[in-house]
Amino acid sequence: MELICISPAELLGVTVALSLVGTAAAYLYYNKPKGCLNPEKFMEFKLEKKTQLSPNTAKFRFVLPTPTSVLGLPVGQHIICRGIDGEGLEVIRQYTPITLDSDVGYFELVVKMYPKGRMSHHFRQMREGDYLSVLGPKGNFKYKPGQARELGMLAGDSGITPMFQIIRAILENPKDKTHVHLIYASDTLDDMLLKKELDDFASKFRSRFEVYYVLSKPPVAWNGGTGKTISREVIQSFCQPAQDIQILRCGSAAMAAQLNALGYKSEIRFESMDWSCCDIGHGVVQRILRDCMRT
């Protein structure tokens, strides 16, 4: 065996280097990067890539100030986006990114653009290199790992995005053992957002995640649910009321009526987490802007 001799000076250098590595690792562990959002001031983020997913849906990737920056959005909360509608009036709307703070350097929105939607017009007109005004975090709901044994999720149309954020956070955290039951309703298969990603989750995390689709206009060969809304029977078959089960809803008011009829108490329900299905009028915009920007 050949002996390797290290001088005291070299040994000191190695010790210092290892010490610095350990210090850096400890710093990153105990000091999470500061988020890029500001709850009182709109920040500008550059559109890096716009990917058309369907004729009326696109994925928007916005870059953060540095490749290691994080958005700083707690799971369960949303952002407020500001734009200009077809008549030149300012409009804001709330959205939930499909990315988490584990995605560094960027964040992504999946946006369904409705023909007469005011904020939809703004996103439809956006081109790569344009900037989006964003304020946040906002919202009263914050998800905490393990806060329930099971989560029942009812989502309608574009209301899937706040659910997707939470689903990702749960499934990508091996310490979070929460079981998720998602019921997702839309008009047609083409109208469903993030279906491929949800199917991939269902395949990869069979013991922790289940998804059931409901269509009002199903194709001929369809083994999911049918109807204009999620029925009481479907909800009951997937999500039985219990104290350690919580229900998250983002969609039509008809779902709330079904939950009431089934006896889901208010303390286990969180509803309309980000109002992403509604455009906000000009008068409301001005009120929110005054509330958010008092300087």
Image: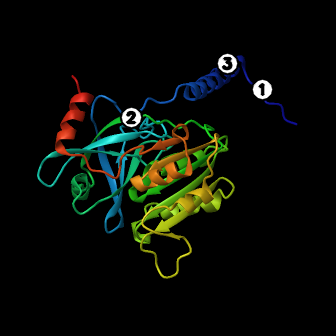
Q: Residue furthest left?
A: 87
Which is in the foreground here, disc 3 or disc 1? 3
The x and y percentages for residue 287 are 21, 34
Amino acid type shown at disc 2:
Pro
Instruction: Tell me the CA gap for discs 3 and 1.
Output: 13 Å
The x and y percentages for residue 220 are 48, 82
- Label 3 close to label 2 by CB (< 8 Å): no
**Which numbered circle lies on residue 5?**
1
Name the residue at 24% across, 49% down: 130
Say which residue label 3 marks: 12
Is 82 left or right of 195, judged from the image as shown?
left
- Quadrant in which the C terminus is drawn: top left
Tell me the element at label 1. Answer: loop
Q: Earlier in the sequence, mark 3 or mark 1?
A: 1
Tell me the element at label 3. Answer: helix
**Which numbered circle lies on residue 137?**
2
Q: Earlier in the sequence, mark 3 or mark 2?
A: 3
Q: Nearer the viewer, residue 51 or 274?
A: 274
Name the residue at 49% across, 66% down: 214
Which is in the foreground here, disc 3 or disc 2? 2
Instruction: Tell me the CA gap for discs 2 and 1.
Output: 56 Å
- Quadrant in which the N terminus is drawn: top right
Name the residue at 63% across, 62% down: 203
Residue 114 vertical position relative to residue 108 in the rendered view, above or below? below
Amino acid type shown at disc 3:
Leu
Q: How is the image coloured?
A: rainbow
Name the residue at 36% across, 40% down: 79
Q: Nearer the viewer, residue 242 or 60?
A: 242
Residue 169 vertical position relative to residue 228 in the rendered view, above or below? above
Is 103 left or right of 129, judged from the image as shown?
right
The x and y percentages for residue 136 are 35, 35
